[in-house]
Image (cartoon, rainbow, N blue to C red):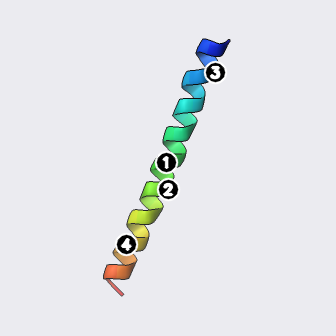
Amino acid sequence: MKRIIKPMMGFKDLRCARIILAGIELNEMNASHP
């Protein structure tokens, strides 16, 4: 079970990080192009 759960948690973290990074990029683009 642990072997299956650990990669899934990492995948979730990766998805969250990607979404957060995308949001930051969008905010920077909006800030540089008012």
Q: Name the residue under label 2.
A: 20
> Counting other residues with Cα less than 10 Å from the Cα at mark 2, is it few (<14), some (14-19), or many (20 or more)?
few
Mark 3 Cα within 10 Å, few/some/many (few <14, many 20+)?
few
* Residue position marked by numbered label 3 in the rendering: 5
Question: Which residue is at a point 68% across and 12% down the rendered structure image?
Answer: 1
- In percent of width and height, residue 23 lies at 47, 62
Q: Is mark 2 on a helix, strand or loop?
A: helix
Q: Residues within 10 Å of mark 1 (few under 14, many from 20)?
A: few
The numbered mark at residue 28 is 4
Q: Are marks 1 and 3 in contact (CB under 8 Å)?
A: no
Rounded to the nearest whole Å, what is the CA distance between mark 1 and mark 3? 18 Å
Query: Which is nearer the N-term, disc 2 or disc 3?
Result: 3
Residue under label 1: 17
Quote the CA–CA distance across marks 4 and 1.
16 Å
Check disc 3 and report its element: helix, strand or loop. Answer: helix
Residues at marks 1 and 2 touching, judged by CB atoms closer than 8 Å: yes
Pick whichever of labels 2 and 4 is earlier in the sequence: 2
Give the image location of residue 5, x and y in percent.
Answer: 64, 21
Find the distance from the CA under tag 1 to the CA under tag 2. Answer: 5 Å
Q: Which amino acid does label 2 sit on?
A: Ile
- Tell me the kind of residue under disc 1: Ala
Spatial distance from mark 2 to mark 4, Cα to Cα? 12 Å
Residue 10 place in picture, x, y as percent: 54, 31
